[in-house]
Image (spheres, rainbow, N blue to C red):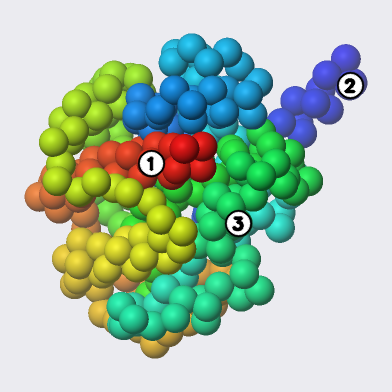
Amino acid sequence: MVRKTHLVLVSLVVLLALCLNPWAWGWGNDGHEIVARIAAMNLTPKARRAVARLLGVSSRPAAVADAMAKAATWPDTYLRMHAPKSKPWHFIDICRGTGPAASLDQFCPAGDCITTKIEQYRSNIPKGQFDEFGGKGDLSLLIHFVGDIHQPLHTATNADRGGNCVNVRQVHSQNLHSAWDTDLVKQVEDGASVEETANTINEQFQDEPDSFSWDAGNAADIARESSALAEKQIYAALKIPRQACVVELKSCDDAPAAVRKLDVALDSSYVEGATDVARLQLFKAGMRLANLLNSMWP
């Protein structure tokens, strides 16, 4: 009985830690699962078989889709607590006002950021060169990171930890980053299941002119694209004043007073427009993930 009680307490502590971690849920579980399922629907047979081998499931499309959806959430639901060094890999803090041609190296200390990790796993996985997480773990991280890099606030900062330090009103979440991670995804779902939402989005955007191809080094370009989207659709749209460049804040207590005092209303008009942006970003992430995996096993 004592052992059972101890396990329950440990589980509660882990859950609380995840809830308090400001970077715990890039796109939220539902968003990552939607991205993975869209990707699974667009894999070539060869890529699907390779993915199935690494994830340890049959190559049936439904089995691969289920496995990819599960893998997509593993870096948030398990790895953050068991491999803290992976936390910075989920984002890159590109400061507002950074020019489109500027090097991103200044925002990726020691190469520990999302752009570098995507390119590393893209290159190494097909060669069977795995790190301590093994083939299944590395593929799970790649799937997850391609989702994260399309969440605009995983690629931008205003001395606010990617919007984590900006208080918001009129939505369920208490900060701007979380609102984009979860509230907008729930709006996209509109009561439908993850599977239904993925199918709907995949059908809705199939005629998009963008090929969503993936070339070596493209992670940096996508980070710039997402950062520009954060500037236009989030910071500028909400009239949030630009702050001096500050990255890697340890906590929101270290954010500028002007950031800590923000109290931004996300009214229905903003949420409606932002939901459209989030829907397209989820599709882009899914298609680019599919094309990336297809290119890894041509």
Q: Nearer the viewer, residue 218 or 91?
A: 218
Three-letter amino acid code at the position of disc 3:
Gln
Three-letter amino acid code at the position of disc 1:
Asn
Q: Nearer the viewer, residue 289 or 87?
A: 289
Image coordinates of residue 172 in percent, x first then y, are 33, 42
Note whether 271 is above or below 168 in the view shown: above
Q: Residue furthest bottom?
A: 244
Residue 171 visible in the shown view: no
Residue at 44 percent of width and 15 percent of height: 61
Three-letter amino acid code at the position of disc 2:
Arg
Note whether 92 is above or below 286 in the view shown: below
Q: Nearer the viewer, residue 64 or 7?
A: 64
**How far is mark 1 from mark 2, CA to CA?**
47 Å
Mark 2 packing: few (<14 Cα in 10 Å), some, or many (20+)? few
Image coordinates of residue 41 in percent, x first then y, are 35, 24
Q: Nearer the viewer, residue 106 or 277?
A: 106
* Label 2: element kind: helix
Quadrant where the image shows the N terminus: top right
Question: Where is mark 1, residue-wise?
Answer: 291
Image coordinates of residue 78 in percent, x first then y, are 66, 37
Q: Residue furthest left?
A: 269
Image coordinates of residue 294 in percent, x first then y, are 44, 37
Mark 1 packing: few (<14 Cα in 10 Å), some, or many (20+)? many
Can you tell which quarter of the image residue 38 is in?
top left
Question: Where is mark 2, residue-wise?
Answer: 3
Question: Where is mark 3, residue-wise?
Answer: 120
Q: Which mark is residue 106?
A: none
